[in-house]
Image (tube, grey):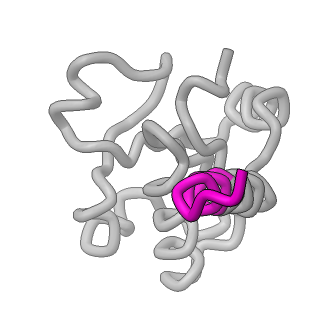
Amino acid sequence: MNSPLLYAILGAILAWVAMRLMMRRNQIKPEEAQRLVSEGALLVDVRTTTEFGSGHLPGAINVPLQDLAKRSVELEPKDQPIVVYCASGMRSRGARRVLQQAGFTAVSDLGAASRWR
C-alpha cells in the first residue's frame, strides 16, 4: 500500500516515539527519585495549583512552572537536592532548565508523576 496517509501516520508515530525517548534521556529513574527524596531532597510538583489540589505525590510542594522563576528563592539553598515532576514530563523538563539557569546545582527530573509508582 503506497498511501500518503499511511506514510503520514507512520511519520507521526515515529516522531512521537523519538520525542518520548529524548525526554526520558534526562529523567532519573523512579527508584533514584525516591532515594533522593528519602535522603531529604525537595519534591516539587510543577503542575498548576488546580492539578496539585486534585492529587499529588506524598511530601510534594507545589510551585507551578509559570511561577517557578520568581519563586525559586523558596527552594534555596541552591545546592539543595530537588526532584521535579509534572503530569507528562514536559513541564518538569522545563522546570529543570529554569532552575539550572537560576544557579541550582542538584536538580533531577522525574518526569511524569505516574513514574513514581
Q: Can residue 89 be seen by looking at this rendering?
A: yes
Residue visible at 38% across and 48% down? Answer: 46
* Side of 37 relative to 30 (left or right): left
Given residues 103 and 26, the one toward you in this image is: 26
Residue visible at 44% across and 56% down? Answer: 91
* Side of 44 relative to 14 (left or right): left
In x, y percent, where is residue 52? Answer: 28, 29
Residue visible at 51% across and 71% down? Answer: 99
Say above or below: 20 vs 66.
above
What is the total number of numbered labels drawn onto the structure image? 0
Given residues 99 and 15, the one toward you in this image is: 15
Q: Residue lying furthest front in this view? A: 1
* Side of 39 relative to 55 (left or right): right
Q: Residue lying furthest left in this view? A: 50
* Side of 17 relative to 104 (left or right): right
In x, y percent, where is residue 112? Answer: 56, 37
Residue 5 shown in magenta: yes
Q: Quadrant of residue 34?
A: top right
Residue visible at 33% across and 74% down? Answer: 69
Image quarter hosting the C terminus = top right
Say above or below: 102 vs 84.
below
Q: Can residue 108 be seen by looking at this rendering?
A: no
Q: Which residues are magenta?
A: 1-13
In x, y percent, where is residue 107? Answer: 65, 60
Residue 80 shown in magenta: no
Q: Main secondary structure of the magenta part?
A: helix
In x, y percent, where is residue 64? Answer: 28, 52
Given residues 75 and 94, the one toward you in this image is: 94
